[in-house]
Amino acid sequence: MLREFKLPDVGEGLTEAEIVKWHVSPGDSVVINQTIVEIETAKAVVELPCPFEGVVASLMAAEGDTVDVGKPIIAVDTGEGASAPRETALADDMVPSPPPEAVAEAKPERQPVLVGYGVKTGATTRRPRKGQTPAPQAAQSASAPAPQAVPAPVAPVAPAAPPGAGRAAPVHVLAKPPVRKLAKDLGVDLAAVTGTGPNGSITRDDVHAAAAEPVAAPGYALPAQGEREERIPVKGVRKATAAAMVSSAFTAPHVTEFLQVDVTETMDAVRRLREMPDFADVKVSPLLLVARALLTAVRRYPLINSSWTGDEIVVKRYVNLGIAAATQRGLIVPNIKDAQALSLPELARALAELTEKARSGRSQPSDLTGGTITITNVGVFGVDAGTPILNPGEAAILAFGQVRDLPWVVDGQIVPRKVTTLALSFDHRIVDGELGSYFLRDVGAMLQDPLRMLAWS
């Protein structure tokens, strides 16, 4: 019996998606909840699990095709003979079948999930293709202990990625803390730098040299020599982002204000937080205190955290804090739900998780909807300021520029201080100049003196 799997709506009213990568081919055996395909919607790359068990009869859309929601993308033969190819392959290669008790123990690991939102790594296993010799590891997996029970090797070894993960393993680099800070300030990826110091360590000169080299923008390759033009299809996230930004720019009357701030005390606070036990397992960056300052200011000026519907202004008593992230697929803005209710360590962990998921392409549609106010950290690119465009449906967005050593007047004396520039864009239909100025002033005051965050919370 042939059953067709139709492309589901994995987001909120999405109408189409692009087939990014198939994980199965005609003739493959599949089980329920096995990841079969990756699709790219206007919001995220999503892994789709198979709702049927059987043998793949045909793929009804090719990689790169854009398919409307509701159209069939794969046909699966769910008849009684569906499992025959696997049994035949095992018999031909004289590989013993796992004992029934092992199969029974393995079944509880398979957890049903909502179609369109993928499955946990290790929750399912892919059966071998017709006529393909199973790998020795696959033959042992049913009776061997769970992979996590095996002791990790001493030497750093890249773990085997799940099918379709496509993500590189973390790379260990040798660099002193000041060099790492310099690389972060200049936007240099240390994993891509060849060290010339002792034992291959990376030096300050290596970082400066890397920063001076031309770098391709995320998702693009440098033009090949001799090429005069390059044509890049506009689709997926980039197409959706372009439409949203055009709509926002020409719908909401934008106003942007700028403020230079002495953040020397904030940088000292970041250093001290990194030494505290509560933050031992998480990365602490200046963005954490910028986020906390913004959340505190929102409590003082709730109208900044609202949206315009035409007939009314909806003031949100919660903050779903958006963080603009540049990824290989383009700009996305995942958000931290109910960020106002998080403690500082919880906020730090939420920021780290949000960033990691965005960079690895694992942000789900639910992560990208429902935002109420946004921060964009342009400082990581070595930029002082800009005029950010509002995320559609929000009344304000705060840009955080790079932190630089600048001459600053303190008590009548010119001294070197850590200085950044904040830029606040807001919807002038909701936020007038006075409110926008007060909000930006207070965020700046809390970053100049972080103790104000406690006093004003």
Image: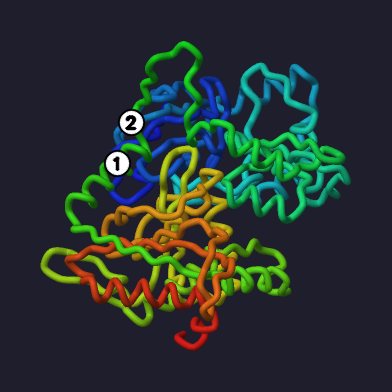
| Rendered position, 400 above or below 109 | below
Question: Which percent across, then down, holds residue 181?
Answer: 66, 54
Please say whether residue 205 is visible from this viewpoint.
yes
Q: Amino acid at mark 2?
A: Val
- Tell me the quadrant of the picture where the N terminus can be found: top left
Residue 425 image point, x, y percent: 30, 61
Residue drawn at (27%, 55%) of the image: 392
Secondary structure, mark 1, is helix
State which quadrant residue 283 falls in: bottom right
Label 2: few (<14), some or many (≥20) within 10 Å? few
Check if mark 2's residue and mark 1's residue have beta carbons within 8 Å: yes
**Which mark is on residue 76?**
none
Please tell me which residue lies in front, 210 or 289: 210
**Residue position marked by numbered label 1 in the rendering:** 242
Label number found at residue 234? 2
Mark 2 to mark 1 CA distance (whole Å): 9 Å
Q: Residue furthest top?
A: 226
Relative to 121, is 230 on the left or the right? left
Position of 292 relative to 103 (above/below):
below
